[in-house]
Amino acid sequence: MRIVKILLTIILLSGLIFIFEFSINSKSQIKPIDAPIIEHKAAENMEVPDFTLYNDANQPIKLSDLKGTVIFLNFWATWCGPCVEEAPSIEALYKKKSTSTDFKIITVVYNDDPAVVNAFMQKNSYTFPVFGDKNSDAAKIFGVTGVPETYIIDKKGILRKKFIGPVNWTDEQTLKLIDDIINGNP
């Protein structure tokens, strides 16, 4: 009986020493990740980090190049039913505001084939600008996980409004909201 108690004590102490040693060694083994981390996600009333998009001719456009302009930034895809439903009102908004120097529409294709997007645009006679997001940098900044998502960024680069899901962009109240942001009244 006495031998059993001694053996159990030795086993218990060995286990505690093992756990203690493992916890000390595992903490010292933690190393920082070398991969770049996007520290700032876009949030309403906060400045949006800079990013670069590319048009169909692979020409870059940076958010920082557009300061002084209100940006309508819409993430969409041809395979997304609500995006297809929303597209006519984006086209109407684009036609209504395309001559404005204070407002720019930028739509960003999200996980879609460029050839399919071009065919979709031609089939529907859409003329609003479409950009690609190489490496999904912009989508990561905004935390896009689904589409459609739209962001209105003011002239100073501050995110003023975020919309998840389809919106009627020709609705009077929506147009007033956009005009208020253009006029500096968020």
Image (cartoon, rainbow, N blue to C red):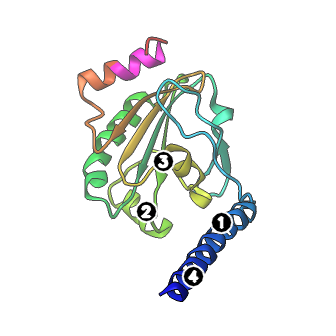
Q: Position of residue 133 (x, y in %)?
A: 57, 55
Marks 2/4: CA distance? 75 Å
Residue 180 magenta: yes
Q: Identify whether 53 is placed above or below 9.
A: above
Mark 4 crowd level (few <14, some 14–19, many ≥20, 10 Å Cα): few
* Residue that numbered label 1 is attached to: 20
Mark closer to the observer (3, 4): 4
Q: Earlier in the sequence, mark 3 or mark 4?
A: 4
Of residue 95 and residue 50, the one placed in the foreground of this image is 50
Q: Amino acid at mark 2?
A: Val
Earlier residue among tags 2 and 1: 1
Residue under pointer 3: 143
> Closer to the observer: label 4 or label 1?
4
Q: Nearer the viewer, mark 3 or mark 2?
A: 3
Secondary structure beneath disc 3?
Answer: loop
The kind of residue tagged 3 is Gly
Q: For mark 2, what is the residue?
A: 117
Q: Is residue 129 above or below residue 25?
A: above
Residue corresponding to mark 4: 6
Numbered disc 4: secondary structure: helix
Residue sitting at 47 percent across and 69 percent down? 115
Tell me the distance, in whole angstroms, between the alpha carbons under discs 4 and 1: 21 Å
Q: Which residues are magenta?
A: 177-183
Q: Which is the main secondary structure of the residues drawn in magenta?
A: helix
Distance between the alpha carbons at the discs numbered 3 and 2: 22 Å
* Separation of marks 3 and 1 at Cα, in angstroms: 40 Å
Q: Nearer the viewer, mark 2 or mark 4?
A: 4
